[in-house]
Image: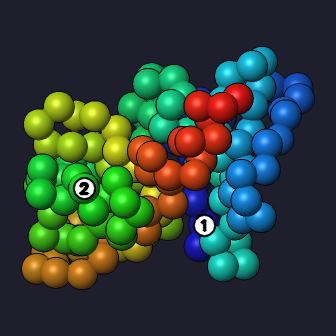
Amino acid sequence: MKALWPAGTVPKVKTFKVYEVDESKHLLVSDDEITCVRVKDDDNIIIIPFLGGKPETLAQFPSVKVDMGAVKFVCNGAKVLRPGIVEFGSFKKGDIVTVQDQTHGKMLAVGIALEDSEAAKAMQKGYVIDNLHYISDKIWEAYKEI
């Protein structure tokens, strides 16, 4: 699975502090700001943006909006299912995608696209986003303690 950051969003830093959340998740901190999260997913290591990071960085990633019925599931770590998605950005399979709630546009999760956005729009059911980091997960709770 190949995940790409949009051009110009990769932070330019000289050093990172790495905080181990568990053996598969790490917070990467630069200049006392948490900028990204390293997640080991199967045999891949993926660097994704941190939900508490700069809003302007998160806004550069493609996104989907989910209905309010899907929010509690996404915030408990569930993969994002097609029926819950009410709005699509443009993305390819393997891209990093943010998940927002429909009503307030609040960032809920960051994950990897399991389908291209065009293919997902045509689906009636099935998984669209693999949820890797979400509000209230271990990474979020560790951030509060740093």
Residue type highlighted by circle 2: Lys
Residues under numbered marks 1 and 2 in contact, where contact means CB atoms less than 8 Å apart:
no
* Label of residue 45 in the image: none
Secondary structure under badge 1?
A: loop
78 left or right of 105 in image: right
48 left or right of 87 in image: right
Quickly name the residue at label 1.
2
Quickly name the residue at label 2.
72
Say whether residue 45 is visible.
no
Please identify, in this view, whether the residue under mark 1 or under mark 2 is nearer the observer.
2
Residue type highlighted by circle 1: Lys
**Relative depth, front residue between 64 and 108:** 108
* Quarter of the image that includes the C terminus: top right
User: For residue 23, which quarter of the picture?
Assistant: bottom right
Q: Position of residue 22 (x, y in %)?
A: 73, 59
Q: Residue furthest right?
A: 15
* 145 in relation to 45, above or below: above
User: For residue 135, which quarter of the picture?
Assistant: top left
Q: Position of residue 109 (x, y in %)?
A: 40, 49
**Relative depth, front residue between 116 and 106:** 106
Secondary structure under badge 2?
A: helix
* 106 in relation to 55, above or below: below
Count of numbered marks: 2
Q: Residue at x 88, y 29 (%)?
A: 15
Q: Residue at x 12, y 50 (%)?
A: 68
Q: Position of residue 123 (x, y in %)?
A: 16, 78
* Quarter of the image that includes the N terminus: bottom right
Q: Neighbour class for label 1 at 10 Å: few (<14), some, many (≥20)?
A: few
